[in-house]
Image: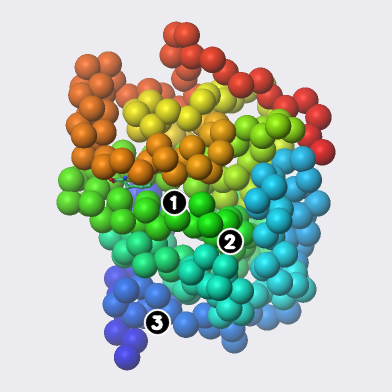
Amino acid sequence: MNRGVAPVTYGQGERPPRGDYARARADYTCEQDQSQYGPADHATYKRLYLRQLQQLPGRACDEFIAAVDQLGTPDRIPSFDDISERLYPATGWQIVGVPGLIPEEAFFSLLASRKFPVTDWIRTPEEFDYVVEPDIFHDLFGHVPLLFNPTFANYMQAYGAGGMKASRLDACELLARLYWYTVEFGLIQTPLGLRAYGAGILSSAGELQYSLTSSEPKRLAFDLRRLMRSRYRIDSYQAGYFVINSFDQLFEATEPDFTPVYLQVREAIALSGEIAAGQALAGEVEFSPSVNPG
Ligand code: PHE
Ligand code: FE
């Protein structure tokens, strides 16, 4: 019953897409093709996993560290079904395979039904330090541990439902900024200092340290409307991060209907413009970098 769907590319779409979209169902999900993984792929996964794991103490938030073992042994690329067997009882989420990036609407509707799409291919050894599109390591290691946290799991579902509405309101670009600055690149303030919870940070060899300790980027308190006015970078470490106090704060701030929020943000942009990545406005208080993580 695999009909195949049109491939999706990132950015300007000049590069040929990665991944085999002919295998995908109409909702863009596909079986995880285990036969595509050879010994070198399992070895790449294990090296990536262990490199990130040793960096987590003092840098990743507790909720992430508490759940990272749920991915199973790092010795081989995990089976999505095995992870779902542990995840579903915990928060009602499941992992589903996809051939790569998928269209916004398909993505939103999977999240809204508590299904997290994970790319089933892994980067090549040449891409060990940097891969342009998200691969299985980013998707699993970066995103899946926090899906074991009930509050964060609820936030992700609400985001999906919000995305379906944003599509109708033509507000996907504003909503995408929320995803970027929280789910991908979020920082959280804890009694022991700043920690990372964003998947883009947690799956990155260099940005985990940079995001917390570098004096270059701006670290500002999470503010929904301000964040939606803020541009972001997709091709380098972030120039700015937003810091939440708790996942409860994040969930509560995003719970109200965004219909009026989008209007207010558009008005602010029309009046004062967008805010460049890494720009702080007059009077904005910056969080200090961490001095001694770990
Ligand atoms: N409350 C948001 C809306 O009405 C839905 C949402 C929740 C969006 C959480 C993002 C994150 O659109
Ligand atoms: Fe991601």
Residue 146 point in image, percent of width and height? 58, 55
Using the image, determine if residue 16 lies above or below residue 81.
Answer: above
Query: In this rendering, which labeled residue sits more in front, label 3 or label 1?
Result: 1
Which residue corresponds to mark 1? 155
* Distance between mark 2 and mark 3 Cα atoms: 29 Å
Q: Is residue 96 above or below residue 144?
A: below
Query: Where residue 149 sits in the image (x, y, percent)?
Result: 57, 56
Q: Residue at x 21, y 34 (%)?
A: 260
Callout 1 crowding tier (Cα within 10 Å): few <14, some 14–19, many ≥20? many
> What amino acid is at disc 3?
Arg
What secondary structure is found at the residue carrying circle 2? helix
Earlier-in-chain disc, 2 versus 1: 2
> According to the image, label 2 marks what residue?
148
The residue that label 3 is drawn on is 23
> Circle 3: is it few (<14), some (14-19), or many (20+) Cα within 10 Å?
many
Q: Tell me if 232 is positioned left or right of 74 in this view.
A: left
Q: Amino acid at mark 1?
A: Tyr
* Ligand 2 lies under 8 Å from the Cβ of mark 2: no
Residue at coordinates 34% horizontally, 29% vertically from top-left?
225
Find out if the beta carbon at label 1 lies less than 8 Å from the nearest ligand 1 atom: yes
Q: Residue at x 80, y 51 (%)?
A: 54
Quadrant in which the N terminus is drawn: bottom left
* Nearest to N terminus: mark 2 or mark 3: 3
